[in-house]
Amino acid sequence: MNKSELVKKMSDKLGMTQVEVRKLVDMLLEEITESLIEGKRIEVRNFGVFEARWRSEKVGRNVKKNIPVPIPAQRWIFFRAGRNVLKALNGTQES
C-alpha cells in the first residue's frame, strides 16, 4: 500500500475529503520524522515503537576492486511491532 492508497482508504472510512486526510497523514509523518531527528522514541500503544539508533562505524569491502571501504557511523530507524499487530499478523486475536 502506498500513501495515496492509504489516504483513499482512510477518506472512505472517515467520510472526509482526500485533501483533508492527506494533510493529516503528512502532519503525522512530519511529527514522527521531527521527533526521530530530535532523538525521541515514538510509542504508539497497540501498534509499535519507532526509534533512531546509531550503527557504529565499520569497514566494508568494494567487491569489484577488492579493497576495504570505510562506512561511517550513522543513525538508522528501527521499528518494533506491538503485541496486537503481531497477533493480527499471525492470525490470532487478543482475548
Image (cartoon, rainbow, N blue to C red):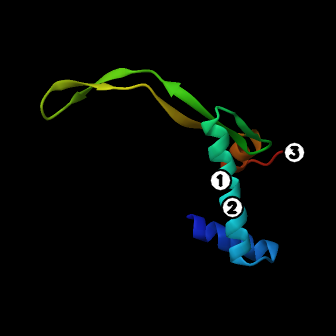
Q: Which residue is at the far right?
A: 95
Q: Quadrant of residue 17?
A: bottom right
| Left or right of 95 on screen, residue 62 | left
Q: Nearer the viewer, residue 31 or 88?
A: 31
Q: Quadrant of residue 52?
A: top right
Q: Say what amino acid the circle numbered 1 marks.
A: Leu
Q: Quadrant of residue 28?
A: bottom right
Numbered badge on residue 29: 1
Q: Say what amino acid the circle numbered 2 marks.
A: Val
**Among the two numbered marks 3 and 1 on one chain, the one whose residue lies closer to the N terminus:** 1
Mark 3 surroundings within 10 Å by alpha-carbon count, few (fewer than 14), some (14 through 19), many (20 or more): few
Foreground mark, 3 or 1, reads 1
Q: Say what amino acid the circle numbered 3 marks.
A: Ser
**Label 2 vs label 3: CA separation?**
30 Å
Q: Residue at x 14, y 27 (%)?
A: 66
Mark 1 surroundings within 10 Å by alpha-carbon count, few (fewer than 14), some (14 through 19), many (20 or more): few
* Secondary structure at numbered mark 3: loop
| Left or right of 61 on screen, residue 92 | right
Quick check: 57 above or below 38? above
Q: Residue at x 72, y 69 (%)?
A: 21
Asked whether the beta carbons under mark 1 and mark 2 sit within 8 Å of each other, the answer is yes
Asked whether the beta carbons under mark 2 and mark 3 sit within 8 Å of each other, the answer is no
